[in-house]
Structures are given as structure tokens and as C-alpha cells.
Image: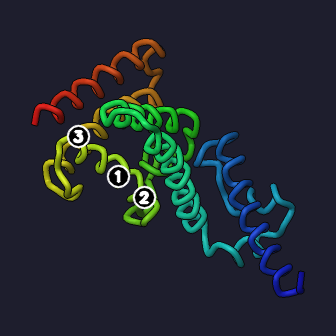
Amino acid sequence: MGSKERIIRQKEETKANILKAAREIVKQEGWQGLSMRKIADKIEYTAPIIYEYFSNKEAILQQLTCKGFLLLSKDLEEVNVKDISPEAKLEGMWMAYWNFAHTNKEMYQLMYGVEMTCCNQGTPESDCPYDLISAQIALLMGKDDPEDEVIVQKYFTFFSVIHGLISINMIGDGLNADMNTQILKDAITGIIRTLVKE
């Protein structure tokens, strides 16, 4: 490997280490505890080196937001490729969404602004979960155009219920696991019924 390739690889590794350190700090201290100085200390670099890779903390948050949407999309895609009925696929995707939020609490908070300001969305990464789920909604409704106003409305009906339940659990004491699961399944099943009827 030439020196140019080695330098590129080292830069990518350093960037990845910065993002990894940021996530570790957030898991321990929450988003309020994240600072450029703490990241530098964690990876044993000086703060100015961190600024060579990210202009400010918001740039790190934006990169982490994109990474979060990529991870969520991967989970949704795993359900999307299964050979199951459209109803089971849509339910499975929303359950994967739910599981992602609880497995990656800090990432979800950043992605959707739960107890903090979220980063800019409207990126290809942030659009992917919507695209995957709305395509299933369109399929169930027998429509070809996932941009249809009714499909958008149905997506946000799902999102409002599920995001609301996730937020209740993140912000407060939440509900017990059995109650959450029942509410979630009732909501998903009920909304799917309206899709099939229309």
C-alpha cells in the first residue's frame, strides 16, 4: 500500500474513532456531556486535531445522525427482503423501528430530537426509512406512487403513534414492556386494517 493510500486510511480511521468516542461519551453522560475537548481526551488527541476532521460539534452530530439513519434503514431493509405478506412486512418494519429506538436510544434522540434539538434532516440517509415504509404502505393500498398525499398521511399516522410511544418511554418512566407491546401491536394492526380497506 502506497503512502497516499495509507494517509487516506489513517484519516478515515481517525474520523471513525472520533465518532465512536462521541457515541461512547453520550452513552455515559448524555448529549449534554459531549464536547470537542472530551472527544479529544478520549482518543488521546489534541482538540485542534478534532477540528481538522469536524468544524464543530454540530458537524459531528450531523454525521452521527446520518449514521443513525443508515443503521435504521439497514434494520428496515432486513425486514423488507423477507418473503412474507405485505401486512406482516409493514408490521415487522415498524417493530424493527421500535426495537432500533430502544437499542440505540441516544442515536434515536439525536435523529428525532427527543429531549434535544435534532440535526438537519432531508438527507438521502434520513429519507430512506420513509421511502422503505411508504413503499409498503403504497403496496398495501394498491397504489403505485409512494408520494401520494394519502400515503404520506398514513405514514405519519403510523409515525405519530410509534414515535409518541417511544418518546413517552424515553422522557418519562414509560409503561411496562407488556403494555408497550400491546399498545404498539394494537396501533399497527388498526392502521394496517384501514390501509387494506381503502
Relative height, residue 179 to residue 130 (above, below):
above
- Whichever of labels 2 and 3 marks the residue nearer the N terminus, that label is 2
- Whichever of labels 1 and 3 marks the residue nearer the N terminus, that label is 1
Which residue is drawn at the image coordinates 34% and 33% (left, top)?
85
Total residue callouts: 3
Badge 3 marks a residue whose secondary structure is: helix
> What type is the residue that disc 3 sits on?
Leu
Disc 2 to disc 3, C-alpha distance: 23 Å
Q: Quadrant of residue 189?
A: top left
Relative height, residue 85 to residue 64 (above, below):
above
**Residue 149 left/right relative to 70:** left
Disc 1 to disc 3, C-alpha distance: 15 Å
Which residue is drawn at the image coordinates 50% and 47% (left, top)?
72
Disc 1 to disc 2, C-alpha distance: 8 Å
Marking on residue 140: 3
In which quadrant of the rendered image does the C terminus lie?
top left
User: Where is residue 86 drawn, in percent x and y?
Assistant: 31, 36
Which residue is drawn at the image coordinates 57% and 68% (left, top)?
59
> What type is the residue that disc 1 sits on?
Tyr
Label 1 sits on residue? 130
Label 2 sits on residue? 126
**Residue 72 left/right relative to 6:** left
